[in-house]
Image (cartoon, coloured by chain):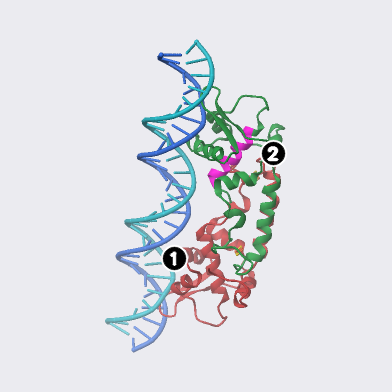
Chain colours: A green, B red, C cyan, D blue
Amino acid sequence: MFSKACKYAINAMIYVASLPENGQRAGLKEIAKAINSPEAFTAKILQQLVRDELLNSAKGPHGGFEIQGNPNTITIAQIVGSIDGDMIFTGCALGLEKCSEDHPCPVHHKFKAVRDHLTGMMLTTNLKDIATRVNDGISFLKY
Amino acid sequence: MFSKACKYAINAMIYVASLPENGQRAGLKEIAKAINSPEAFTAKILQQLVRDELLNSAKGPHGGFEIQGNPNTITIAQIVGSIDGDMIFTGCALGLEKCSEDHPCPVHHKFKAVRDHLTGMMLTTNLKDIATRVNDGISFLKY
DNA sequence: ATATTTAAAGATATTTTTGTCTTTATTTAA
DNA sequence: TTAAATAAAGACAAAAATATCTTTAAATAT
Ligand code: FES
Ligand code: FES
């Protein structure tokens, strides 16, 4: 469904969003440990999220990463789009170059509803809400 | 969503199922051409489908592949399971070792509904129905 | 029997994804 | 002004997925 890179990205964003409002930034090591991901690979992913303006980063002592903007307005869809691109939102399930009503693949009519369900879910799920669930101890970032 | 191997597998199964009941078997070349897939790679995939008893194969002149059993009873879920395994049906969206209600990832509650939708769709979509759509010219196996 | 046709099997190659290592740039604090 | 802490960037490596090539086995037809 999602690439491993994308899963790490989502988990990392949730972790950072779950930290106290006025606290320190989260460093790479801290993040990788919190989500149980390979550190150097995670670094690459965080860089991409910074490029796409979902995270801010700062170098030096007390540097690290923080959510850019309001976690209430950042959706899973944005994170997925940043790392995996938009094939998951628009691509054909069976690999046709283009998903379209005019030239549909054999499962288009069935698949489109599922894909729209997935897309809708991702678009309407914001970071804040799921980070809160983590803070409340009702969901988990690892194991 | 699906691996390329899995997409080829689904398309190949649909193509074979779309052929006339009492006709010849479909050869590898014919199948690969019909679904626009790399021939040798497709061969490997067909072998797997034969192993999993979704296809029958015969060597020699007039040999080739045919659907094993009734296309009405073969689902997309079976084909996907044969090639990609069942992580798509049961795996955690964020990569936790195990998807469970007891130790859910942060998107479990949202994702489960989508995954169940997808699973249900795959379980209830049979080869016969979608092959018919191809024969009726309302859906397409390539381009 | 032999030649031909076809799939199966296994080895190899290429590409993509995942992961690591090294160097550089920037910030902070002593 | 120097040392330490940190992320960024780029080179490199390993693993997995995709793809190809070669050899073998089986079936058919002559
Ligand atoms: S054409 Fe394949 S999903 Fe739309
Ligand atoms: S625990 Fe992640 S989807 Fe169920």
Snapshot quadrant of residue B11: bottom right
Disc 2: which residue: A130
Q: Is residue B28 magenta?
A: no
Q: Is residue A8 magenta?
A: yes
Q: Which residue is found at the position 55% from the left and 37% from the top?
A: A50
Q: Position of residue B18 (x, y in %)?
A: 57, 75
Name the subunit of mark 2.
A
Region of the chain picked out in magenta, as a range: A3-16
Q: Main secondary structure of the magenta part?
A: helix
Disc 1: which residue: B38
Label 1, ligand 1: CB separation under 8 Å: no
Q: Quadrant of ligand 2?
A: top right
Q: Amino acid at mark 2?
A: Ile
Side of A91 where A120 appears, left or right: right
Residue at disc 1, secondary structure: loop
Q: Position of residue A93 (x, y in %)?
A: 59, 60
Q: Which residue is found at the position 41% from the left and 65% from the top?
A: B40
Comparing A115 with B86, the one in front is A115
Q: Position of residue A3 (x, y in %)?
A: 54, 47
Q: Position of residue A142 (x, y in %)?
A: 60, 36
Label 2, ligand 2: CB separation under 8 Å: no
